[in-house]
Amino acid sequence: MEAPVTADRSQRLVRTAAVIAAAVILATALAAVWAIVSSSDGADDDRSGPDPVGFAKLDPKSQQLARFLSPGELVGGSFVTREPSDVLDLGRSMGLDPQGGDEPDQPELGPDEQTVVLFFGPPDATVRLAAHPIVISATLGEDFKALRALAPPRPAGEPIPVPGRPYVAVPLPFDPSLRIPEDRRALILGSLSQLVETIDGRPYASVSIGSDCADVAEASCTIKLEGLAPGSVDQWDWWSAVATKAARWSVAFEPGQLHLAGVPRWLAREAERIARTDPATAADIGQYEEIRDFTWDGAAPGLIRIRYWRTCHFGSQPLMASLADHGVPCLDYLDVTVDVPAGRVISRDTIVERS
């Protein structure tokens, strides 16, 4: 026979049941909240990512740019189509600005002919336009205006790339058709591998090597190497070197012929942000038209030079330098050197070229 339940035990059972019920209710509520938050995050991710159909119509360089863009940046868009008037109307309806005037001339196309329509505007709208069936393919172009939208600050304490020579241990890739005679090719490429340096010590994303060994005595070769920096959009280092028979085909770089513009985009944008947050530097930059390039210094990790350009002006009029048969604009450059780790501008210099 079961023992009777006392009053105290009955109260304990009631309290236990209440606690269990409350826990179930809380767990259910938390699950519901988590489901809502997760759904919301997923929706935000979907909205912030590029349209997958439009993205697939972009060339690889444009896809790379689309992945790197910060909020607020604008791009140029080039759209291949057989129906330019409809693309113009669609682009305007998406908030894009046609390039070439409000009513750019549109040619009459034959049955299989194509043309290109140009726009400027937000990248998400640009990629959505690319997704439309009347667009055959599209490319994106980076906005290099001097006062373009800035990137957000990088996290504090983020490591700065340290230059290194990645091909000391890894063979330098080359096209088998490279025109260097067999008797010296291994020596030249081996020597070149010992010297080529990248901004972060990683191999280039792509390497192109050219050579000229066509001198009469065949006693020297000129070597041109171009390397695409990883994490950049079409930013290359250019190396020029000479190898001679007298030096047993070892490579020596030509003075003044190196152009180290292979800067990862995040580092270039951070240097630009620092430059523009310095009031005096920002005022100078505002007088220029576009960014020409970013370059790095192998002897000073984190030191980035930004070159801006404009057409030279005399008073309010552009200054023209006349050549023999036509006029070409005089170019005025502003070089801003930024110490990215220190977060400061260390120099501003101007250069004028009239040739």
Image: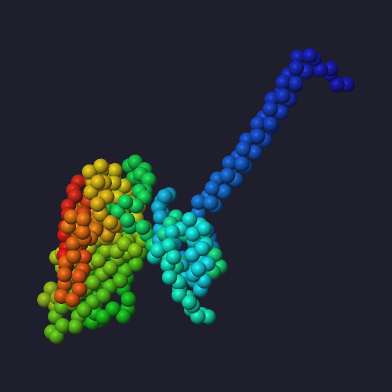
**Residue 289 as seen in the image, left or right of residue 115:** left
- The answer to whether any part of residue 169 appears in the image is no
**Residue 324 as seen in the image, left or right of residue 197:** left
- The answer to whether any part of residue 41 appears in the image is yes
**Residue 231 as seen in the image, left or right of residue 345:** right
Q: Quadrant of the C terminus?
A: bottom left
Q: Nearer the viewer, residue 98 or 186?
A: 98
Tell me where residue 117 sits by quadrant.
bottom left
Q: Residue at x 24, y 58 (%)?
A: 309
Q: Nearer the viewer, residue 173 or 96?
A: 96
Q: Residue at x 37, y 45 (%)?
A: 152
**Residue 7 as seen in the image, left or right of residue 77:** right
Q: Position of residue 22 (x, y in %)?
A: 68, 27
Is 132 above or below relative to 146?
below
Is 178 above or below relative to 50?
below
Furthest-top residue in view? Answer: 7
Q: Position of residue 293 (x, y in %)?
A: 27, 59
Q: Position of residue 30 (x, y in %)?
A: 62, 35
Q: Nearer the viewer, residue 349 or 287?
A: 287
The image's colouring method is rainbow
